[in-house]
Image (cartoon, coloured by chain):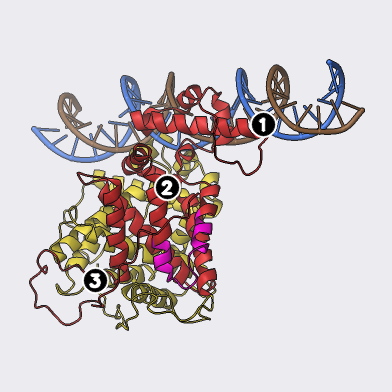
Chain colours: A yellow, B red, C brown, D blue
Amino acid sequence: MGVSAGVAEPTELGLRERKKRQTRDAIREAAVRLVADRGLERVTVDEIAQAANVSPRTFFNYFRSKEDALAGIDEDEIEETCAALRARPADEPPLRALAAILTARLERRMLDPRMHQARVQMHQSHPQLFGAHAATWRNFERRLAEVIGERTGLSADEDPYPATVVAVAMAVVRSTISHWQGTQNPSAAALSANLRAGFDSVARGLAPPASGQPAASGQPRAAPNPPPATPPLVTPADATPA
Amino acid sequence: MGVSAGVAEPTELGLRERKKRQTRDAIREAAVRLVADRGLERVTVDEIAQAANVSPRTFFNYFRSKEDALAGIDEDEIEETCAALRARPADEPPLRALAAILTARLERRMLDPRMHQARVQMHQSHPQLFGAHAATWRNFERRLAEVIGERTGLSADEDPYPATVVAVAMAVVRSTISHWQGTQNPSAAALSANLRAGFDSVARGLAPPASGQPAASGQPRAAPNPPPATPPLVTPADATPA
DNA sequence: CAAATCTTTTCACTGGCTGCAAACTTGTAT
DNA sequence: ATACAAGTTTGCAGCCAGTGAAAAGATTTG
C-alpha cells in the first residue's frame, strides 16, 4: 500500500526484501484481524496462512508461534525508548524520567486509539499472550534498567535499584492501563491523568490517599507511611518523538 | 510417602479425596523434578504421566497444560495470603502490610530452598511459564487489591490505588528475586534483606540511593525526589503461619 | 541464459490437548 | 454382603501447533 513518500529509506530495498516485508505484514494483518474477530482460540494458523495467501509452513518461517504474530514490541521500539530515556536531563531522578518517557510512549500510542484498544482487549482476554511476549518485555525492562544504571552510576547487575525502579514503573503502567480500560470513559486524557496520579502516588511512597473514609476508623496513628508532601512528578513535557 | 503426622486436617477427607490429592501431588512433583533436570522442552507430558504412574490422559484431567502443572500458586494459597493480609493491624499502611505478608510468604518458601531455587530457575529460563501463569497471578493480585480496598475504604474497581499498591509490591518481589538469584550467595537471609531494602526504597518514593557516585556528576541539585528520611518498612515480625 | 542463492511449498512426523465411551473404584443404601 | 450410583481412570480417535528435510519456484548475478 503506497510507496513510502518523504521519509528517506536507508537503502533501496531489492525486490526480494520488499516481498518479504509485504508477506510479513500480510500475515500480521491477517492474524490481528482474524483474532480480533473470533478470539485467539477460534483461529488456526492454517486459516491465518490462507487469509494471507501463503502456505501454513511459510507462516512459521516468519513467526515462531501464533502468538508471536500478535506481539506488540520490537527491537526498534526498545532502542527508541532507551534513547528517549538517555535524553532526559542527567540530574532528573530515575522514577521521574521513567514516568516521563513511559507516559509519552503511551500517549503516542493513543494517537491510534482503535488499535490501542484492540491490543489492550487482546491482552485482557488472552493472558497467554502476556506469557508469549514475556521474553520481549523482560528484555525491554533489562535494557531500561541498564540505562538507569548509566544515569545513576549503579551497575544494573550489582545494585538492585535500577531493576526495581524499572519494574515498579512498568507495574504502574500496566496496573493503570488495566484499571483505565475498565472505566466508562477510557479516553486518552483520562489515561494520562491516571498515569500521572499513579506515578505521583509512588513518588510519595504509596501512602494511602486520604479520600473516602480513613478505612477502619482506627485512631489516626502516628506516621502511617512517609507522610511528606511532594511536588507532582510528570509534567506535560515529554516529547522525544520517534 | 509418609502419612502426614501431627498436623490436624481440617475435615477428615474421604479416601476418594485423599487419593485425588495424592495423584495431583504426584504429578506436580514429577513435573517439577523432570523439568528441573532436563528443561521444559525436553520433557513430554507422557513422560510426566509415566513418572507419576498415571495415564497421559489422566494428566489432563488434573492440569490444563504442561505449564499448568508447574504453577506456583493455587486457590488455597491465595486465600491464605489474603487472610494474612486481613490479619494485619487495620491502621498499618497498605504498602507496609503487603511488604510484611509477601516477605513472610517468601521466607516460608525458603524453608525448602532447593524447591524454591528450582522454581526460580524454571521461570528464569522459560519465560513462557510467566505467561501460562499470568491468569493465576492476575487473579492473585486482584484478590489482594480487594483486601486493600476493604482496608482503605477505597473500592478496588473505582479507585486505582489498591491495584497500584499491589502491582508495585509484586513488582518489587519479582524484581528482587530476579536480582537475588543472580548473586553469588543466594541465601535466604540475603533475599530477606534485599526485599526489605526494596520495599524501604519504594516507601521512600524510590529516590535514587546515594551510593556510588552521584551519576552524571551534576550539581547536587535541590530536591531530586522526595528526600525524606523514613523508618524501615518491614520488621522481622511477619508470622501468620499456614 | 545459466548458475548460485534465497523463498516457498509439500510431506512426514512429534507432541500438546480434547471428546467420548468403556472399565474400574469408591461411597451408599439396602 | 450386594447392588447400585457416582466419580475416576484409561484407551482411542482426532485436531492443531510446530519442526526438519528436500523438492520446486523465484530472484539475483555473471
In three-dimensional space, the C-alpha distance between marks 1 and 3, rounded to whole angstroms, equals: 55 Å
Give the percent coordinates (x, y) of residue B140.
49, 55
Tell which of B19 and A121 is nearer to you: B19
Q: Which image quadrant is residue A148 in?
A: bottom left
Between disc 1 and disc 3, the foreground one is 1
Tell which of A20 and A231 is nearer to you: A231
Q: Residue at x 40, y 30 (%)?
A: B33
Quadrant location, the C terminus of chain A: bottom left
The answer for which chain carries disc 2 is B
According to the image, label 2 marks what residue? B131
Whether residues under marks 2 and 3 lie with C-beta atoms below 8 angstroms apart, the answer is no
Q: Secondary structure at mark 3?
A: loop
Give the percent coordinates (x, y) of residue A168.
33, 63
The answer for which chain carries disc 3 is B
Q: Residue at x 51, y 62 (%)?
A: B87
Q: Type of residue at label 2?
A: Gly
Q: Secondary structure at mark 1?
A: helix
Q: Residue furthest front?
A: B6
Whether residues under marks 2 and 1 lie with C-beta atoms below 8 angstroms apart, the answer is no
Residue A93 as seen in the image, left or right of residue B192:
left
In three-dimensional space, the C-alpha distance between marks 2 and 1, rounded to whole angstroms, equals: 33 Å
Do we see residue A31 in this rendering? no
Q: Type of residue at label 1?
A: Arg
Residue B34 as seen in the image, left or right of residue B76:
left
According to the image, label 3 marks what residue? B207
Tell which of A39 and B75 is nearer to you: B75
Q: Which residues fall within the magenta stretch?
A: B81-99
Q: Is residue A56 magenta?
A: no
